[in-house]
Image (spheres, rainbow, N blue to C red):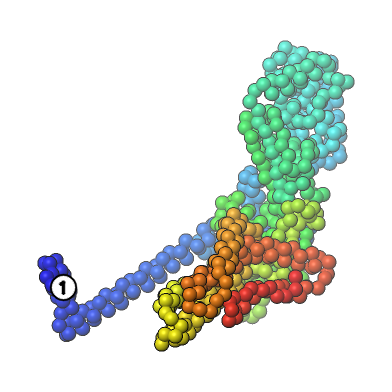
Amino acid sequence: MVRGPEAVNGINSVRGLQGPPGRRGRLRVHATGRSWCLAGAACLLAIALLHATRIQAQPQRITLIPATVGDKTQDISALEAPIAAALRAQAVEVIALDEARALFEARHSAEAERLSDSDIDIVADEARAALLHVATGRTARARSSIAEVLERAEKALEYLNRTNDSARHVLNACLYLVRAMAESGNRESALAKVAECRRLVPDIAPDSHDHPPAVISLYREAGENITARPTGSLTVKSTPSGCDAFINGRRLGITPYEVKELPAGEYRVQAECGERSGRVHRVLLAAQATTVMVDADFDRSVRSAKGLGLVYPTLAEAEVLRLKHAAEVSKILGSSHALLVTPEPELRTLRLDLITAEPAAVVASARLPEPAEVREQPNLLLDAVEALLRGESLAFTEASAVAIPPWKPRLAVVSPEAPPPSSSGAAVAQASAAPSQPRGWREPLALGLLTGTGLVLAGTAIWLQVETSRRADSFRDMAPDAPDFLTRQADFDRGRLGTVLTHSASSAVLLSSLPFWHRYGASRGRTKPGVLHWTLGGAGVAAFATGVYFAAKGPDCLDARCTRREPDRLIGAALMLHALPLIGVPLVKLWKIDTHSKASQRAANGQAAPPAPGQVQVEVGAVGPGVGVRGSF
């Protein structure tokens, strides 16, 4: 056989690389040395990356947030200075309580202003005095009185407009100024002022008994001018929906609620699901559609009258909502982390929880003696802050620090349909002992092992299936009395059984990983099935139906001619078995949500927990696989 020069050169080059035995050994030593060098460099690079990641994860800006269970914000002003000093000693910037309050009210919402009955009476008296000045021609005095009324009204508009009487006082005072302008010959200024009056009180028209026809005509003309020009619309939404929607203190409807053809300007939006006044969201409306989304639970929990803090009526709600709300406050203020300061009067302790804003997660926790003792021992705060920044959870309530588990918040399931039982209007259901983040390293390890093992078993089953089909081809055309027929048939049967067993094991392992995947998603806020979950579930149903078709393609038979049908039956069994984990992806989400909801209802009613839930069981016999559900539901 004649070889070309390329082939000869290729052979020679390979032989040249191999060389004599001694040289081959040296080459192997050099190759091994290079491998060790590459491995060492990779390890050093991984350590450097890990160190860089740790440096980036170090908190650069922390917000102090007191969290209280009770009626009002816990005063931690005495602890603010030593905690801030301990953080600054670690080169961490701190947002103090007063600064946090000012930033939060400027960027998000403020407490609703309240006026006493005497203040409301003063507004009414000043409005009547302004009318008297206008009627007697004292325009300067009228403008001065009306300016005082409107200034007082602007400060607490959301409170004054709650009742029709006080809202009409505000509208009348504004229109009295319009009358004074019109009678002075300033018609354009009067029209512009009418638009301002309509913005202040958007849903009350002037009464002809209080104002002359000229003012009523200007009011109507201003309304026509507003509709003729580009106007804005304001939509108020809330979670949960069904809350009272207030705009400038006037209750206009139920969320979601849209108001169209509003003149440009500032509006104050509130959504109230309970008896407590909603926080005021200031919106600067232009000639466009604007939507305000209000989280009723968040607004009810935030307090900013004195400093900034979180308040919860019950410990159960605090355990469910505190992490989410603290992370939201941090994002609004532009800080990477928050330090939750939570007094625990029943334990006579003070707890510090360091959390990240994005994603919302607990980094570490520290438990200290009650605040009075902490103020007397400032070194405790220094040690606690250092431990928190290292990611260590310690208790400093004894003579020496003791390791404790970090705070594990509970999951919440909010029902968007049912009216909430709490005063805020948000239904908070607590999942029994289900943390919102993976439990240390065990759950991620179990998730990785189960998923990896299931995929490896699936790959092995596919390989076995290919081998089984090859074995079927080896004796398909043989006569039953051939010498090797029985041996090859037994080999084929063993391969078929091994294939089914491996497919079944893979399906069972992947099914058992679904609860861990649910917890992993829940720790990132994905507690409900999404588009991906339903897509995988639909693919599973299609795969199961296809598997049924393949499994039913031919009747059972025992002769050699039927072996060509066996690969189809194995394909059908494989499709049905591996369709089960896909079908379970959305179902486990729905089942977990339903379980959380029922658990919270039983806890609220004082009922005992039900028996263990049903379990999916995969069984394999000589004929083929079977799937069953066992347990109580």
Query: Which structural element holds mark 1?
Result: helix
- Tell me the amino acid under the disc marked 1: Ile
Q: Position of residue 614 (x, y in %)?
A: 70, 73
In the rendered image, which residue does mark 1 sit on? 11
Q: Position of residue 442 (x, y in %)?
A: 57, 75
For the point 66% across and 79% down, the residue is 398
Residue 401 in view? no
475 vs 183: above or below: below
For the point 71% across and 50% down, the residue is 239
Q: Position of residue 256 (x, y in %)?
A: 72, 42
Residue 336 in view? yes
Q: Residues within 10 Å of mark 1 (few under 14, many from 20)?
A: few
Which of the pair 132/541 is nearer the observer? Answer: 541
Q: Which quadrant holds residue 529?
A: bottom right
Q: Position of residue 106 (x, y in %)?
A: 63, 44
Looking at the rendered image, the quarter that the C terminus falls into is bottom right
For the point 72% across and 72% down, the residue is 613
For the point 71% across and 47% down, the residue is 238
